[in-house]
Image (spheres, grey):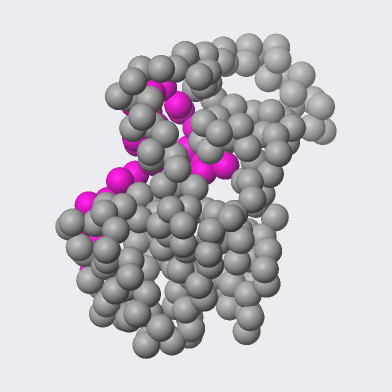
Amino acid sequence: MIIKNKITKEEINEMPKVEYQGQIYIIDTPQQADFAVRYLSQFPLLGIDTETRPSFKKGESHKVALLQVATDERCYLFRLYKFGLTLPLIQLLENPHIAKVGISLKDDFLQLHKWAPFESKNVIELQTLVQDIGIDDKSLQKIYANLYSCKISKSQRLSNWEADELTIPQQHYAAIDAWACILIYRKVEELKETGDYELIVVPEPTPVEETIEETTKL
């Protein structure tokens, strides 16, 4: 397959949107969380992501509202703002036998520490991993598009993650962000093992091109 070290927004916009086909479970109580963690603890690899209610006022901030944990076929949406970070969830994040894969997980875990202290173990950072095959992009959307030629929609990113009920678009957005991390991890590991890819290095814009681009924005 052909991959690029960088991919543009214009290229992504031409791609079909990703559709999540797995099962989604919304977790609203500590009891539901305990049951979900028992299920998730069976898997050696989990996709992780978080969502936080956006702040539109200076100085305003919120704790993580949603923790998404995905397998290949399911995604659990833990509504932390309703019940916090429970001990079973902490034990899952600290379990050294379960790999947790995601984007900017250091930042996610730093925010989760506002709920409770924990020491995450067996964490795989995709931004670092993709460098092994020459990808320089950092965002989930760009990395996924580069590897799968599909677009992850970001339209729900600034929605209210503390709403009484999550909408279907919110649920699918949140699930895709965690589930896609597993797919990226598996694809990168496959390409590293087989070497079955060609890397195209996109040249950096020349100073003239940069000037034209800046002028166009004005």
Residue 179 placement, left or right of 86: right
Q: Which part of the image, by quadrant, shows the C terminus?
A: top right
| Position in image of residue 137 (x %, y %) | 50, 32
Q: Nearer the viewer, residue 44 or 139?
A: 44
Say which residue appears at 68% left-offset and 72% top-offset: 167
Closer-to-camera residue (19/133): 19
Q: How many numbered marks have been drawn onto this rendered protein structure?
A: 0
Horizontal side of 178 relative to 121 (left or right) equals: right
Residue 215, percent across and down?
79, 25
Q: Residue at x 79, y 32 (%)?
A: 217
> Where residue 124 sits in the image (x, y, percent)?
30, 46
Query: Is any atom of residue 20 visible in this view?
Result: yes
The quadrant in which residue 168 appears is bottom right
Residue at image x 43%, y 53%? 72
Residue drawn at the location 70% of the way across and 34% of the way down: 15
Residue 138 lies in the magenta-colored region: yes
129 or 55: nearer the viewer = 129
Whether 4 is drawn above or below 21: the answer is above
Residue 206 falls in image quadrant: top right
Residue 29 vertical position relative to residue 111 in the rendered view, above or below: below
Region in magenta: 118-141
Residue 102 x/y as whole percent: 40, 50
**Residue 106 seen in the figure:** no
